[in-house]
Image: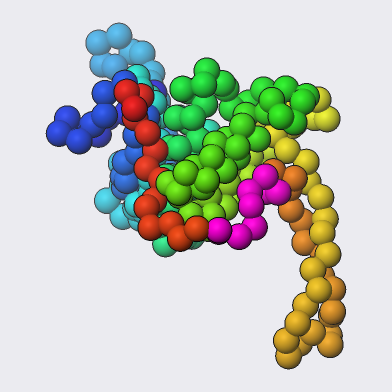
Amino acid sequence: MQVLLGDVSATMIINDFYTREVEVYRDPELAISINKETGEENLKLAESKDEEQIKVHILIDPHGYLVKPACLYLYWKKDEEQVKTTATEAKALLLYFRFLHQNQLNYWKFPHSKSRKQTFKFADFLVASINSEDIAISTAKTYLRVIVNFYKFLGRNNLIEFSEKNKPFDFEMISIRQSGMLSHTQRVISVQTTNLMKRLPRDQKKHVTRKLSPLTQEQ
């Protein structure tokens, strides 16, 4: 389905991915319209004046089409998790899908070798951006967590069939020792993480004032 966003020619990026914030129905419903001349039945989005609308970001590919898995995830974040804004998630997904596109990679089929997986290549790209002082570690970690949560969403909803031979990363449990007032109740807690996050350094060695802007196709 092609995206119809009205007159956005002034800010639209040609031949590149881009994001937009749009208003959509929280609980959209379909209706059947009948062509009076041919009798053909077509599905369309039912219009309702009383239906609640929410603002959510969408990701659009260079051909002007929705990147559907990314849009579904962004809608879920807004509707189910009720985040205040999906701006950060949209920036992370924009950067990720632009990276995949520029490196001729897809998002759903993964090599068995960890170093060849798209997700790990993206993490290495973020590390290089940290080393060149284009991005802070905190921003890189935030973006990478978005990608992890994106794939967890795809897996939960069977939008990608993961297996031992086809998976974006490995999950593992780590133990964290607590400190503070309540540490006597549970000194050690177990937290689920991924081996992907280990790709990033722990501390920022240099002060970074610039933020990473997703590169355009020409750049």
In the rendered image, which quarter contains the N terminus?
top left
> x, y percentage for residue 182?
76, 87
Q: Exactly how many numbered labels are in the figure?
A: 0
x, y (%) of residue 4? 27, 29
Q: In which quarter of the image is residue 150?
A: top right
Residue sitting at x 17%, y 30%: 9
Residue 194 x, y percent position in the rendering = 73, 48
Q: Which stretch is magenta? A: 197-205
Q: Is residue 200 magenta?
A: yes
Q: In which quarter of the image is residue 42?
A: top left
Q: Residue at x 71, y 29 (%)?
A: 115
Q: Can residue 218 be found in the magenta stretch? A: no
Q: List x then y, in percent, for residue 85.
A: 40, 57
Residue shown at 35%/38% (left/top)?
A: 19
Q: Give above or below for 69 relative to 37.
A: below
State the residue at coordinates (52%, 46%).
Answer: 131
Front one among 145 and 58: 145
